[in-house]
Image (cartoon, rainbow, N blue to C red):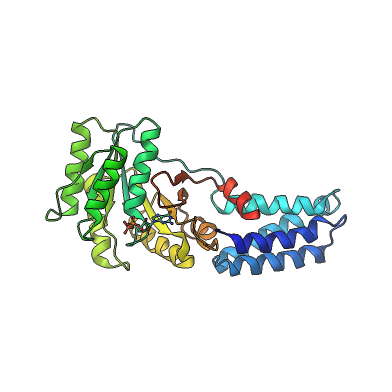
Amino acid sequence: MAFEGLTGRLQSVFSKLRGKGKVSEDDVNEAMREVRLALLEADVNFKVVKDFVAKVKEKAIGKEVMESFTPGMVIIDIVNKELTELMGGSQAKLAKANKPPTVIMMAGLQGAGKTTTSGKLAKLLQKGNHRPLLVAGDIYRPAAIKQLQVLGEQIKAPVFSLGDKTSPVEIAKQGLQHAKDNNLDYVIIDTAGRLHIDEDLMEELKQIHAAVNPDEVLLVVDAMTGQDAVNVADSFNKQLELTGVVLTKLDGDTRGGAALSVKAVTGCPIKFAALGEKIDALEPFHPERMASRILG
Ligand code: GDP
């Protein structure tokens, strides 16, 4: 289960606090020292942890909290609120173009879950009575086009492909035109990933961006990779102006670092969470629910 270690650690810190009728400054300092270690162990970015602990301390150490009837509970509540803030505060919704179609460009490293997420997102949009078009822009990974077509068949969403001999920029442009011609209101462009960030990849993504002027640029990152996911997001964001992040593989035993750091480090909100390989396993990301889940 995701966050298991972190949840267990936090629960043991808080069970000590909860039992206390009075909380001293030393108690708070000791508790926050343990929270700090728990977050670092969960692979949360060092600076994020430092700021987080400072904020919670500032709010927790004060007459109002310490003289309340249940200081322990009040402190847990402060932690819950700060965790929620850390992950963006409130739900960041998907953008919608004034004039359809809304264009969503998917980006990410190979294996992060881009193609799968494209299919899942199309399914989610269909549930909201939309008509998405999937555009097969990953012409380099041998199975990517076929994979998208299979996903499209599964959910009965059209898939636009020009095979693997036409440039992704051209595919994206023609895909957008195809959506306009066929009254489809969302265009989801699957793009190529590489094993590592490289200049060719970025250049291609920039060209696609310039060609279709997307309403959303969603970076798909594998939550299991922790701090690496955050670094990847940071690098992409510096070059591509992301509008949101999709965290995948939250069903795995991710420690939590990516979920808790990515917004603070990149400024980019997490818009969706993927919790499995199945086509239904994508949901809008709710910071407050995730914070409650982490606290257990
Ligand atoms: P791409 O290279 O970024 O397009 O990655 P794919 O979409 O092909 O996904 C790579 C692998 O990760 C596939 O085996 C997917 O089934 C798997 N995958 C994607 N999202 C999730 C997820 O949320 N949970 C789990 N457990 N597996 C996922």
**Residue beneath the point at 40% across and 32% down:** 128
Q: Is residue 36 above or below residue 68?
A: below
> Can you tell which quarter of the image residue 19 is in?
bottom right
Q: Position of residue 84 (x, y in %)?
A: 60, 50
Q: Is residue 59 above or below residue 195?
A: above
Residue 179 as seen in the image, left or right of residue 98: left
**Residue beneath the point at 23% across and 49% down:** 136
Q: Position of residue 254 (x, y in %)?
A: 52, 62
Q: Position of residue 73 (x, y in %)?
A: 77, 51
Say which quadrant the N terminus sits in. bottom right
The residue lying toward the viewer, choosing from 190 and 203, is: 190
**Residue beneath the point at 33% across and 47% down:** 118
Residue 261 as seen in the image, left or right of residue 96: right
Q: Position of residue 74 (x, y in %)?
A: 76, 50
Residue 123 as seen in the image, left or right of residue 10: left
The residue lying toward the viewer, choosing from 244 and 1, is: 1
Name of the residue lying farthest toward the left: 165
Q: Is residue 7 above or below residue 84?
A: below
- Quarter, ligand 1: bottom left
**Residue beneath the point at 20% across and 56% down:** 139
Residue 51 visible in image = no
The residue lying toward the viewer, choosing from 206 and 112, is: 112
Please give the count of numbered marks on the rendered protein: 0
> Can you tell which quarter of the image residue 44 is in?
bottom right
Residue 215 visible in image = yes
